Image (cartoon, helix red, strand yellow):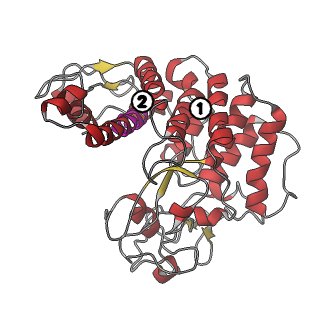
Amino acid sequence: MANSFIRESEDGVLSSRGISGTDADKIRAYQLEARFLRALSYWHALDLFGNVTFVTEEDAIGAFLPKQISRADLFSYLESECKAIEAELPAPKLNEYGRADKAAVWMLLANLYLNAQVYTGQAKYTEAITYSKKVIAEGGYALQGNYRHLFLADNHKSTEMIFAATFDGVKTRTWGGTTYIVHAPIGGDMQAADFGVDNPWGGLRTTSALVDKFSAGDQRANFQEAGQKKDIEDIGNFRDGFSIKKWVNKTTTGANGSNLTWVDNDFPIFRLSEAYLIYAEAVLRGGTGGSNSEALGYVNALRSRAFGNSTNNLGSLTLPNIIDERAREFHWEAKRRTDLIRFNQFTTGDYLWPWKGNVKDGRGVESFRNIYPIPAPEINTNPNLQQNPGYN
């Protein structure tokens, strides 16, 4: 869809249709955002599947079999595409909420560079520092005072939100998105009304590995313990495992969202705390342009918010500090898999969690599982595609 919009909004096409002036300018602005959304989607494909099909607005309209692009080449394309649109997008916070601006592009670049070693075999931690610093110094964002407010029905008001997938109980209804995230972990002794929804789905819980990463007083530890067992013996039994109460379809005033079935909670794709932790990790990994003292300050700012004071602040930083802090800060925000791969812990036996490798106590698995297989329907219909190693 992005390719189609970009193709139909080129200057020559607009001119041929008699579109000019203010209308043409608005369409060009939307085109830049379409290019960002395409880049964001290609980043997800790059991260999840590695070598994927590649199509742009330059390809012919109609049925054809797309070529496969290597992970390294797709990385290079995304880097150049982000830099091409960066200068022309609105300054941070000057676009309508939920639409892309410069800060969204900076965060995408920072994530690309932080994971460049995985994607291309070449580290780019200095670049990760550069772009995370731009978000911190030039974005005008501030940490949300109360961590839990980041995941409520009116989280669009947050001072920390850089780019979000917006959901609305009246205007943006889906059984996926945050509707799924809010409903699915409610069950057992939990009351749906406490979460601003009409019924529990009784599905999702977490393993003890996540629970054990939190210490007493950390407000990010949003677990339902009453009526639940910490350890999961039977995955099909909702009462095995603690449920997570991070997402609630209520506002900061305690009022329900606009609808009890479809929720109002926006999903934060990028927020300021991630810029802090990208900066800190990139410094520890040897990137230049940052300092250990600033990195420590950013991590401790998150810990001070989490505990309500500086008592639990760290005196120094290590990479294990970072991976654990990211687990606490971003649980259920779709970042953990990428983080574990970057730290070489996703498939190896160095870090185990219950039911890793489909074994109750966890086990290491084959390294090829660091990326997913290209879906069989794609492989079967497109002879240009080669399956990822290990999945043949």
**Residue found 23% across the figure and 36% down from its top:** 20
Q: Is residue 351 visible?
A: no
On the image, which quarter does residue 60 sit in?
top left
Which is more toward the observer, 86 or 149?
86
| Mark 2 vs mark 1, CA separation in Å | 14 Å
Q: Could you say which is closer to the camera, residue 333 or residue 365?
A: 333
Residue nearer the viewer, 63 or 207: 63
Q: Residue visible at 74% across and 62% down?
A: 218
Could you say whether the residue bearing mark 2 is in a helix, strand or loop? helix
Q: Residue 25: x and y, percent?
A: 32, 38
Residue 71 in the image, given as x and y percentages of width and height: 42, 21
Range of the magenta residues? Answer: 33-44
Relative to 243, residue 384 above or below: above
Mark number, residue 342: 1
Q: Position of residue 47 (x, y in %)?
A: 45, 33
User: Label 1's element?
Assistant: helix
Q: Nearer the viewer, mark 2 or mark 1?
A: 2
Q: Main secondary structure of the magenta part?
A: helix
Q: Position of residue 44 (x, y in %)?
A: 42, 37
Q: Is residue 303 depicted above or below 124 in this figure?
A: below
Judge the density around disc 2: few (<14), some (14-19), many (≥20) Cα neighbours within 10 Å. Answer: many
Question: Residue 46 got which mark?
Answer: 2
Mark 2 / mark 1, whichever is N-terminal: 2
What is the quadrant of the N terminus in the image? top left
Image quarter of residue 180: bottom left
Left or right: where 336 falls relative to 55: right
